[in-house]
Image: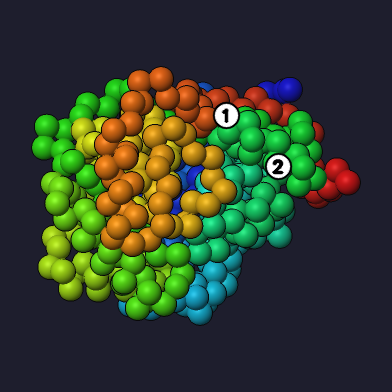
Amino acid sequence: MTMASKRRTIAVVTGSRAESGLLLSTMRAVRAHPRLNLVVVVSGMHLVSGSWRDIKSAGFTIDAKVSMQVKGKSGRSADVAALGKGITGFGQTFDRIKPDVVLVLGDRIEVLAAASAASVGGYRLAHIHGGDRAEGVADEAIRHAVSKLAHLHLPATAQSKRRLARMGEQPHHIHHVGSPAIDGLGLVEPANDAPELIVMQHPVGESDKQESAWMRATLLATKPYKRLVLMPNRDPGSDGIRRAIAGLRVQAIDHLPRQRFLSLLKGAKAIVGNSSAGLIEAAGMRTSCVNVGPRQNGREKPGNVIDCAYGRGPISAAIRKALRLDLRRLHHPYGNGTAGGQIANLLATIDLRAIPIRKQNTY
C-alpha cells in the first residue's frame, strides 16, 4: 500500500438519523486523520425532518445538502421520484467536491442514490455494512445493489465478508472492520430515568391499515410495562403506525439524540420492535431484544434476541422470555468497537490506484 502525497478527500454521505449516528465515530476518525479531509454531505430525511442539525450539534460542518424527499409525500412512488432527484443532486455535488472516495453506510434510498451517482460519475465508492441480510421494505435489494456498485467493502461481520466474496467482489477489496454502531458503547452510562421497555417498530411496506393493526398489537402487549415509544421512520406504511399510536393516545417521541437514546437503551430491560438497534447496539450493551416480524429476517442475531410474530399474544410471551435472559456471556458478531478508526486508516493508506474504477466480477 502507498500513501497519497496530499490529503485524500472523503465524502461521507448521510441521509437519515438511522445511519448518521452510526457514522459519527468514522467521521471523527476521518476528521482527525492527518492524511484525510472530511466532507459531510447530508440528504434525504435529514432535510425533511431537520435532523441534520444533530450532525452540526455534534461539531461537524455540513459541506453540502442534496434534496430528495418532499415533506408530506410518502409511499413507493414518492421514493422512486426522490431516488431520481437524489442521483442528479449527488452527481452535481460530487463533480463539485471531487472526492477521492465516497463513503456510504447501509441500505436506504439515499445510499442507493449516492452510490449510483458515484459509480456512474467515476468516483470510488466505499460501503459500510455491505453483505448483511435484512428484509426491510426494499433494504436487502438496495444493500446488495450498492455492494455491486462499490469499489471498497467494509462489512460488519465475518459472514457478510464471505457473502460479498460469493457475490463476485474482489477479496482483497473486502475488509472486515465490524459495525461502527458498536464504537464507544462501553463509555455509555445507563440513564437513571430509563424505562423498562423501549418500543421502536418501523413499517415493512404493507398497507397503512395492516401496519396500524400490527403496531396496535405491539402497543397493547407493552402497555403493562413502563415504556418509551419512539415514532417510526418514514418508509411506506409509517402513517399507519403513527395512526395506531395516536388512536391509543400513546405519548411517543419523534426523535432522540443518539447519546440519549443509547443511555436509555442501556438502562432499559428490553427493546421491542424491529429496529437493527435491537440486534447491534442493544446486544453491545447487554439489553434484551424482542424482534417482531420479518424486517430483520436474515440478519445475524446475537443471543439477546427473541424473535416473535406480530400479535399481542406472541409479543407478550416473547417479552416475558426476554426479561429472563442471562446475557453475561453474550457473543457479539458485529465487532469490538474499533470500526471507525479502522475505516479511517484504510481510507488513508490503501493504494487507490490498485482499486480500478471499472469493476469486474471474479466469476
The N terminus appears in which quarter of the rendering?
top right
Q: Amino acid at mark 2?
A: Leu
Q: Is residue 234 left or right of residue 82?
A: left
Q: Is residue 273 above or below residue 170?
A: below
Q: Earlier in the sequence, mark 1 or mark 2?
A: 2
In this image, 44 relative to 241: left or right?
Answer: right
What separation in Å lies between label 1 and label 2 (alpha carbons)?
14 Å
Instruction: Give the quadrant of residue 172.
Output: top right
Q: What colour scheme has been applied to the protein in the rendered image?
A: rainbow
| Res. 27 visible in picture | no
Residue 323 is tagged as none
Q: Which residue is depicted at the point 40% across and 42% down?
A: 306
Label 1 amino acid? Val
What SS does tag 2 mark?
helix
Which residue is denoted by mark 2 in the rendering? 164
The structure residue drawn at horizontal position 84% and vertical position 48%, both measured from the top left corner, is 360
Mark whose residue sits in front, 1 or 2: 2
Residue at image x 24%, y 47%? 198
Q: Nearer the viewer, residue 320 or 76?
A: 320
Residue 240 or 257: which is nearer the viewer?
240
